[in-house]
Amino acid sequence: MTFKVRLQPSGMEFHASPEETVLDAALRQGVVLPYGCRNGVCGSCKGRRIAGRIDYGRFDTALLNTTLSEAEQQAGFMLLCQAHAAGDLVIEARTVNAACGIQPRILPCRVARLERLSEDVMRVQLKLPATERLQFLAGQYIDFLLPEGRRRSFSIANAPHADEFIELHIKHVEGGRFTGDVFSGLREKALLRLEGPLGNFYLRKDSTRPVIFIAGGTGFGPIKGMIEHALAEGVTRPMHLYWSARSERDLYLDHLPRAWQAQHRHVRYTPVLSQPQAHWPGKTGYAAAAVMEDFPDLSGHEVYASGPPAMVRDAQASLLKQGLALENFYSDPFEFNEKPAP
């Protein structure tokens, strides 16, 4: 048994079974909807139910109430990555262009290099078999496929034109099962399995708008890949990176954006520290506030934000008040819950 799902305003239709989420059904049939974590945390996949019934199954009600406000739920908003169709549906949700027809694949990989970039950030470089290549867009992510059906998502930090290795920036999360293994047990030459590429976080090439990047912590990783690829392709529209961290030592590759700024007139870099030492001469507080101070009118800009979900949500809410159009805000909120395989 399947149900028909119709999207507004595009008019696109697909079918969903009660056993799969609306998002999974759409992606399976080539309908690309906005999404991020696929775990109900980031809120990137919000849509609004116009008609029909849905079922969240075993999804945690407390988490639902965290991601969707009471007002949003009353207005019919839903999480497409968790909701199952319980009948025919009409949903208001924007579609995005498929990522150049790139399909996710499951591949083996080997840990080629491990490098500590700071006390709690590890650069992990993965090598695919000699006969394989992972085609991806700068900014997308991969999932590690772990025992017991677990998954762990990490953004790709290198650009597609420099794909000898798949580079990840992994932050040690207190109590994190997988990240703990990365810092204490993972060794070079270890074999892993990954699925990718995934996600809709990539630089839109059909736009000429000035770009503002907001990175929180290791959210710098995917943005690094996006900027490096844009520079390699000769993109000249203005790009301004705001990298938010607690202290200077958390800007673990600070020399890179400083070099981009020195070598390219259209690139600017502003680090923002929330817990700076007394001698810090730069901006303090939070990145969104720094953007609002520098850009009173964002109506002509695009913003790409990557980092903790709370930072991304706050940035979106703040910058929309500054004239930014919702359709010009793209995000990759990091969530740290390990998720089961679909």
Image (spheres, rainbow, N blue to C red):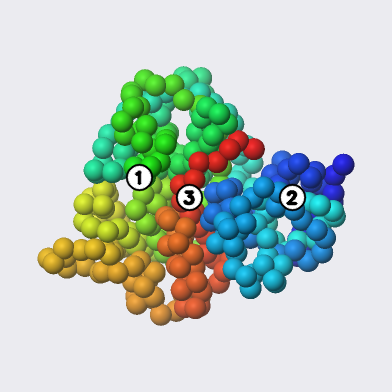
User: Which amino acid does the dot numbered 1 rest on?
Assistant: Glu
Rendering coords of residue 22 (x, y %): 72, 50
> Which residue, given by chain and number where applicable, does mark 1 sit on?
174
Q: Earlier in the sequence, mark 2 or mark 1?
A: 2
Q: Secondary structure at mark 1?
A: loop
> Which residue, given by chain and number where applicable, does mark 3 sit on?
335
Residue lying furthest right in this view?
A: 1
> Which residue occupies 30% across, 58% down?
245
Instruction: Please state which of the two labelled residues, at mark 3 or mark 1, is closer to the viewer.
Output: 1
Rendering coords of residue 276 (x, y %): 20, 63
- Circles 2 and 3, Cβ within 8 Å, touching? The answer is no
In which quadrant is the N terminus drawn? top right
> Which residue, given by chain and number where applicable, does mark 2 sit on?
84
Asked whether residue 130 appears in the rendered view, the answer is: yes
Q: Secondary structure at mark 3?
A: loop
Q: Earlier in the sequence, mark 3 or mark 1?
A: 1
Instruction: Please state which of the two labelled residues, at mark 2 or mark 1, is closer to the viewer.
Output: 1
Between 181 and 305, the one lying in front of the other is: 181
User: Which amino acid does the dot numbered 3 rest on?
Assistant: Glu
User: Which amino acid does the dot numbered 2 rest on?
Assistant: His
